[in-house]
């Protein structure tokens, strides 16, 4: 900063005031430049992802990218409760399963569009989330995590062992096949991967925007406060349990929407592919490695880990199935040792430095 | 009318009576000091007022209303704020973030809450550290942060639990100034403290608790020369002769 040398020439009676005013103004200008740079970069990324399907024609690659977005979406939903509220849910696949089964059963048996079934699934997932969350969200540490695992596994075993739940056909371990008869937007079914790409991109943008809004709202502050120091938060007027329950409801709802997406994307669901611990753990892995409680963390985590998962399935699938979880484990251990707050922290620091340097460049360029 | 009243408040943990029929009252705008040897039941009484747990027997009356068993977050909205003896900052967040959490008690808009938080920080001459991460603060600043957060909830009654423990003498003096200043703002303050020099200088009245019972009450001078108090602190042999 060149502020000090310039104010030396000013009025001696009020040196501090002028200096402060000068620093304030130049800091403000700098902030404006930085905000602009951030917006331009964000816009560039947005245009890039919107144009991506025009560049990539290989369905395999598009499939991999759709799954990256799918996991980024799932992890961001998970992050609402697992990140901000400071608890560790390890059974989120159950809400994915509820979403997938609800919309699929409704469309197969009653001809209801999955677009509508999606929201029914979301609401059912909220109900299920309350059943598990209300008694357990008050627990700290491992107990909540264990309760969610037990609940998810219980539901999976149940679904695997029943053909009919009341009038609804679940078809046990064989799962449900969705015949691709009515292709088009009305039935959420497409022969190309491009529409799926845009749907999951849209969902991801919605959940990111929601997370950003929540993190800057009273609820977000209350969740963070309650997650870090519940007693102190309560003394400051925070009903910690209520904040956590609201976060859990939001998280369950949006996770279930992804379930419908998954069902329509793969057109075949069974208990192992939807309500499995593998998925629950993968979500938690992505969040922990990327950085829980941050907005960028789940995206970074999914960007880094999903390719590992897909490539290991391609190359080791026959010899070592589940290799990706082993790799995740190793990466997680390393990240927890060297960057306990996730990879987003060093990356954010680097990004900030780059933006600062760019801002300096612009301001200096402007002065000349 | 008294802002706070305790009528025969008793708190038992199993067979242990931590607070035994404690009665006290506080007028608006008063600074009341609560002292007593370690384990006397000060913090337990404090927690009964702050809603951490309900008293076993007796009544806690705030502003004419019985508040037994109400939850801390509800009491906070009624105007009771507290600090913690062992400071509990939201460690990964900035000072401003910490104080804004408190300010959300009276508003739902982030802009308003942040503006109020900055006002409070300015009031405490603390706004130069608003962007510092709270885990990087010195112990004196962490205690100051505890007070700032509590203050942001706009309390009428402020409960301070050993905010001067662990501070250097110069910092203690600074804290005494802050607490006096808060009283000038119209806040009623209950102070639990071990540093006699500070509490003698600060309090309008002092209540002494020993084994859960009130053994003395009065101005600092009265309490300092009270025979029971001297016995409680120094042992039976040290009677005033």
Image (spheres, coloured by chain):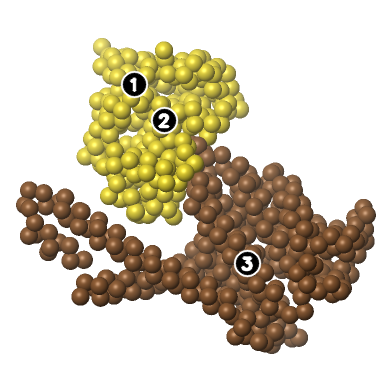
Residue A146 seen in the figure: no
The residue pinned by badge 3 equals A202
Helix, strand or loop status at disc 3: helix
The residue pinned by badge 1 equals B29
Q: Nearer the viewer, residue B207 or A276?
A: A276
Question: CA gap, disc 3 to disc 2?
Answer: 45 Å
| Image quadrant in which the C terminus of chain B is located | top left
Question: CA gap, disc 2 to disc 1?
Answer: 12 Å
Give the chain ID for the yellow colour.
B
Q: Nearer the viewer, residue B44 or B82?
A: B82
The residue pinned by badge 2 equals B155
- Residue B115, x across and y down, in percent: 37, 44
Is residue A132 toward the left or the right of residue B55 in the image?
A: right
Subunit under mark 2: B
Residue that appears at 53% across and 34% down:
B73
Closest to the camera, between mark 3 and mark 2, is 3
Residue that appears at 30% across and 19% down:
B204
Q: Earlier in the sequence, mark 2 or mark 1?
A: 1
Helix, strand or loop status at disc 1: loop
């Amino acid at each position: 900063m060149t502020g000090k040398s310039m104010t030396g020439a000013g009025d001696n009676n009020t040196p501090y005031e002028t200096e402060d005013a000068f620093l304030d103004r130049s800091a403000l200008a700098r902030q404006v430049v930085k905000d602009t740079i951030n917006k331009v970069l964000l816009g560039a990324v947005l245009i890039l992802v919107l144009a991506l399907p025009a560049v990539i024609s290989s369905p395999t690659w598009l499939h991999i990218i759709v799954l990256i977005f799918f996991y980024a979406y799932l992890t961001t939903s998970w992050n609402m409760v697992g990140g901000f509220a400071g608890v560790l849910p390890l059974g989120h696949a159950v809400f994915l399963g509820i979403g997938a089964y609800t919309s699929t059963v409704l469309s197969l048996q009653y001809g209801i569009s999955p677009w509508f079934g999606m929201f029914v699934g979301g609401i059912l997932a909220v109900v299920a989330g309350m059943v598990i969350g209300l008694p357990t969200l008050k627990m700290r540490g491992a107990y909540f995590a264990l309760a969610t695992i037990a609940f998810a596994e219980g539901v999976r075993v149940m679904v695997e062992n029943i053909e009919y739940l009341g009038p609804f056909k679940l078809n046990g371990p064989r799962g449900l096949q969705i015949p691709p008869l009515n292709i088009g937007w009305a039935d959420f079914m497409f022969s190309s991967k491009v529409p799926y790409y845009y749907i999951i991109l849209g969902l991801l943008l919605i959940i990111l925007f929601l997370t950003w809004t929540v993190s800057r709202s009273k609820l977000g502050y209350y969740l963070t406060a309650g997650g870090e120091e519940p007693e102190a938060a309560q003394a400051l007027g925070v009903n910690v349990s209520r904040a956590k329950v609201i976060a859990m409801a939001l998280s369950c709802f949006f996770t279930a929407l992804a379930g419908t997406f998954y069902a329509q994307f793969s057109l075949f669901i069974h208990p192992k592919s939807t309500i499995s611990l593998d998925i629950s753990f993968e979500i938690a892995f992505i969040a922990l490695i990327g950085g829980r409680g941050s907005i960028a963390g789940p995206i970074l985590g999914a960007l880094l880990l999903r390719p590992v998962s897909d490539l290991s399935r391609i190359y080791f699938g026959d010899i070592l199935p589940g290799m990706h979880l082993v790799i995740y484990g190793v990466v997680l251990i390393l990240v927890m040792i060297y960057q306990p707050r996730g990879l987003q922290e060093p990356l954010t620091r680097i990004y900030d430095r780059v933006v600062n340097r760019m801002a300096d460049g612009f301001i200096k360029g402007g002065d000349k | 009318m008294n802002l706070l009243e305790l009528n025969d408040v008793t708190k038992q943990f199993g067979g242990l009576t931590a607070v035994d029929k404690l009665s006290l009252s506080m007028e608006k705008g008063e600074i009341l000091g609560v002292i007593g040897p370690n384990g006397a039941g000060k913090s337990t009484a404090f927690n009964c007022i702050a809603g951490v747990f309900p008293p076993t027997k007796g009544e806690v009356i705030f502003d004419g209303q019985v508040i037994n068993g109400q939850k801390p977050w509800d009491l906070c909205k009624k105007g009771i704020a507290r600090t913690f003896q062992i400071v509990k900052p939201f460690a990964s967040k900035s000072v401003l973030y910490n104080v804004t959490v408190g300010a959300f008690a009276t508003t739902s808009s982030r802009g308003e809450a942040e503006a109020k938080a900055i006002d409070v920080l300015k009031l405490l001459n603390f706004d130069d550290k608003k962007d510092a991460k709270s885990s990087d603060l010195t112990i004196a600043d962490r205690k100051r942060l505890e007070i700032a957060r509590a203050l942001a909830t706009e309390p009428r009654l402020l409960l301070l639990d050993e905010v001067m423990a662990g501070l250097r003498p110069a910092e203690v003096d600074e804290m005494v100034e802050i607490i006096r200043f808060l009283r000038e703002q119209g806040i009623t303050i209950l102070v639990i403290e071990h540093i006699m020099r500070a509490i003698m200088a600060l309090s309008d009245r002092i209540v002494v608790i020993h084994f859960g019972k009130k053994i003395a009450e009065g101005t600092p001078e009265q309490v300092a020369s009270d025979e029971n108090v001297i016995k409680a602190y120094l042992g039976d042999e040290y009677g005033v002769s």
